[in-house]
Amino acid sequence: MTTEPWDVLIVGGGPVGASAAALLQVATRDARRPLRVAVLELNRPAAVPADAPLDARVSALSRASERILMAVGAWQQIPRSRMQPYERMRVWHESVQPRSADVLEFDAAYAGEPNLGYIVENRIVQTAALEAFESAGGTVIAGALSRLRVHGTHAELETSAGTLNCRLVVGADGARSSVREAIGLSADTSSYRQTAIVANVCTELPHEQTAWQRFLRTGTLAFLPLADGCSSVVWSADDAAAAPLLAMSQSDFERELLRQSDAVLGAVRLRTERLSFPLHKLTANRFTAHRCALIGDAAHVVHPLAGQGVNLGLLDAAALCELISAAFRMREDPGAQTVLRRYERWRKSEIEPMAWAIDGFNRHLAHGAGPLSRIAQRGLALVNRTDEVKRFFITRALGLDGELPRIARQPPALN
C-alpha cells in the first residue's frame, strides 16, 4: 500500500544507516517541521542480554565516531561493560621482535587523548543507534527492497512491507547494495585474494588495553582488546593460507595463532567459533544519483587492517546529514542535486586517499618483498622514533584530521 511520502528513506539499518537516520531526526527535531525519516531494515537484531558472551564481530570506533554516536544519544545506550577503550597500538613486521625498539607504538598520550578509541560489538552499536532513532521520533519499517524507481520529484520503492515513496533514498545496505544496483551506479571492485578469519580468544597474558598487529608475509594478524579481558582476532590471510587455517582442529589453530603472533600474548584459547569472509575492495564511481545517495559499504569498502570501515561510514552519514539538514532548514528539497553533489565531492576527497594508503600498507607491509617493501618495513621503526609523525598518524586514526563534519569536530554539548 502506498503511504504518504517520506522526506528521507534509508535502506539498511546497520550501524551506519541507523546512525544516519538518528542524525537526521535529531538535527531537525526543533525545525518548523521535522524531517520525516524512515529506515527499511528486514533483519533487526534482538536486544542483547547483559550477560551474553561478547560477539566476535566488532569494530574499533574512533573519537569522531564516538562524538557522532554521542550526539544522537546512541553512545549513552551502549553498556560500558561491553565497551573496551584501548590506549595503545603496537604494530610490527614479522622480521622484528614484538617488544623491541623497532615496533611502532601509538600511544594516546602522544595526542593528549585518554584513549585511541573503543572496541565494541557491531550488533550493540546497531541496536543503540536504532533505539536512538526511534526515541527521537523515527520509524523503522521491517522489510526488504525489491524494486526502486526514481521519478522527477520522488523515488518509489517496492518492498516486502508495501510501496514507499520518498524525496531522497539513501543506500546504506552494504557492499552488495540493492540501491546501488537499482539506480545503475557502477563500482570498481577487486579481490584482495585474502580471507578474514575472525574469532574471540582468551590469552595467557593480559591485552594491556592495547591493539596488537603483526604484518606477515601471508597477511595481517591483529588482536583487539575486549571488555571481558579476552581479545578479538582478525586474521587477514592470503586465500591459500586461510583454507588450511579454517580446516585445522581447534587445538592446531590455537598453536598456529601462538606461533604467528610470536607469542606476544602467550598461549591462546578459542572462545568462539571461527568466522570467515572474503576480502575485497570496492569504490562506487559515483556516490549519488538523482534523489539517491550512497553511504558506508554501499559506497566504499576498504581493507580491514586499519579498522576504518565503520568509521568512514559514520563520517559519510554525518556529512550527508549536515548538508541535508542545512538545506531543509532553508526550505530546500533534501533530495536536490546541488546538495547531493556537495556530499559526493566532500566524501570522495576524503575516502580516496585513505583507501590508497590502506592498500599501500597491505601491499608493502604484509606481502612485499622488493626494495620498496623493505623500505616500508624499516619505516615502521623510523616512524616510532619521530613523535611528530606519530602524532599525525594518531590524529588520523582518531578520525580528527581532514575535512570533518561539524558534529565530529567537537564533543556535543550534553544536557
Image: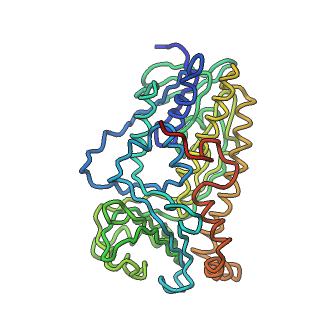
| Residue placed most toward the observer, 198 or 190 | 198
Q: Position of residue 195 (x, y in %)?
A: 48, 63
In the rendering, at what x and y percent does residue 351 appear? 67, 52
Whole-percent x, y for residue 76 in the image: 41, 43
Query: With respect to residue 154, does 54 lie above or below?
Result: below
The residue shown at (60%, 56%) is 281
| Left or right position of 196 against 184 | left
Residue 238 vertical position relative to residue 101 in the rendered view, above or below:
above
Between 393 and 141, the one lying in front of the other is: 393
* Colour scheme in use: rainbow
How many discs mark residues in the rendered view? Answer: 0
Asked which quadrant contains residue 165, the reply is: top right
Asked whether 355 or 400 is in front, the reply is 400
- Relative to 285, 83 lies left or right: left
- Kindly give the residue lying farthest to the front in the view shown: 415
x and y percentages locating residue 89 in the rendered image: 51, 70
Q: Is residue 27 left or right of residue 357?
A: left
Q: Determine if residue 369 is in view.
A: no
Q: Quadrant of residue 287?
A: top right
Q: Does residue 343 appear in the picture of this structure?
A: yes
> Residue 391, relative to residue 347: is it above or below?
below
Which residue is drawn at the image coordinates 49% and 43% (left, top)?
69
Say whether residue 117 is left or right of residue 388.
left
